[in-house]
Image: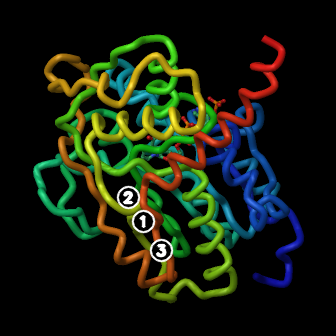
Amino acid sequence: MGAEASHRDLLLLGASGQVGRAICAHDQLAPRVAIADRTSVDLTEPASIRSAIRSARPRWIVNAAAYTNVELAEDEPERAFAANAVAPRVIAEEAQTVGAAVVHYSTDYVFDGKAREPYAESAATAPLSVYAASKLDGERGIAESCERHVTIRTSWVYSEHGKNFLKTVLRLALERDKLTIVDDETGVPTAAHELAAVTAVIVASLDDVAENDARWGLYHYAAAGATSRHAYAKDIVTQASVRGFPLLATPDSVIPVSSAAFPMKAERPGYSVLSTSKIENAFGIAPPPWQDSVGQVLERLKTEAAPEARHA
Ligand code: NDP
């Protein structure tokens, strides 16, 4: 870490989101974090972004803020593009001006899902939805406007906070004895705490390096392995049951169904497994099996639920 590492020299956007909260909770990152929340920075107001960065003059900007409602984006393309495409470019321009480095996050949805082997960073993109197209534009804005940047594409993010697939499945399994879950989408569940840990490694590794270091650029990070939504839901039910959650559903009552049974406005890629060899080789990062973090997040949800259960 650099000499100034004890200062709050890492400006975090999106601190209330899944990844933002995990960054705030990370031992190595937390002491450096200065939060710019929605009251000071609105992604859809470029002037607010510019003034926050100019006054903070951070060493790092970590952009965990984004318009993440994939369905609603189909109806609100202007808002999605303002937050996911225009804002990252503005962030990167200001970072370049004040000499900050940027960490930004993007999505597996930039791919169309027609591949049958993990996507490398160099694979052709073909976004299927407004959200995906806006995020792809944002990646380009970052890459074109700031030399010292790392963009991390990731997939199926979940944590104990916010809205996500794991929490929805857990809630349904507590309420119902049968769940129907799509089995024709393959990807990799990735915990927000893994992304915070990866961000910490990248920040520490690149703290003092120049813009011509070969490690700046675009990376894929996801946990190890791959699964369908259906098998993921079964694992959540299995692991939650082992941990004593009073579920009505059982692993055998999680029924596979085609995504055609749940028509959505935004098309999702059928296959979006990301190859992580580039980030493994550049930073010595070893993604854990996706099931490990599912267990850890369920443990945290169990601990959080315990006091309520006692008072119920
Ligand atoms: P969340 O939806 O949990 O959090 C989004 C954050 O962005 C919140 O802090 C939210 O603030 C903030 N935000 C949204 N709109 C604005 C705005 N106009 N101005 C300022 N802040 C705003 O996101 P995640 O943590 O899940 O995602 C982090 C990153 O990972 C994003 O770039 C996302 O695209 C990417 N990603 C996410 C995946 C997923 O499955 N969730 C999958 C792949 C990539 P507030 O709380 O006030 O609304």
Packing grade of label 1 (10 A; few <14, some 14-19, many >=20) is few
Find residue 140 and name its label. 2
Q: Nearer the viewer, residue 151 or 286?
A: 286
Please provide percent x and percent y for residue 182. Answer: 23, 29
View quadrant of ligand 1: top right
Residue flagged by tag 1: what amino acid is it?
A: Glu
Q: Residue at x 16, y 62 (%)?
A: 117
Q: Quarter-wise, where is residue 252 in the image? A: top left
Q: Nearer the viewer, residue 164 or 83?
A: 164
Please tell me whether residue 170 is drawn above or below residue 123 in the rendered image.
above
Name the element at disc 1: helix
Name the element at disc 2: helix
Q: Is residue 3 left or right of residue 15?
A: right
Q: Residue at x 18, y 61 (%)?
A: 124
Dividing the image into 4 quarters, which one contains the N terminus? bottom right
The residue that mark 1 highlights is 144
Residue flagged by tag 2: what amino acid is it?
A: Arg
Q: Is residue 13 left or right of residue 44?
A: right
The residue that mark 3 highlights is 286
Q: Quarter-wise, where is residue 232 in the image? A: top left
The answer to which of marks 2 and 3 sits earlier in the sequence is 2
Name the element at disc 3: loop
Dot 1 and dot 2 residues touching (CB under 8 Å): yes
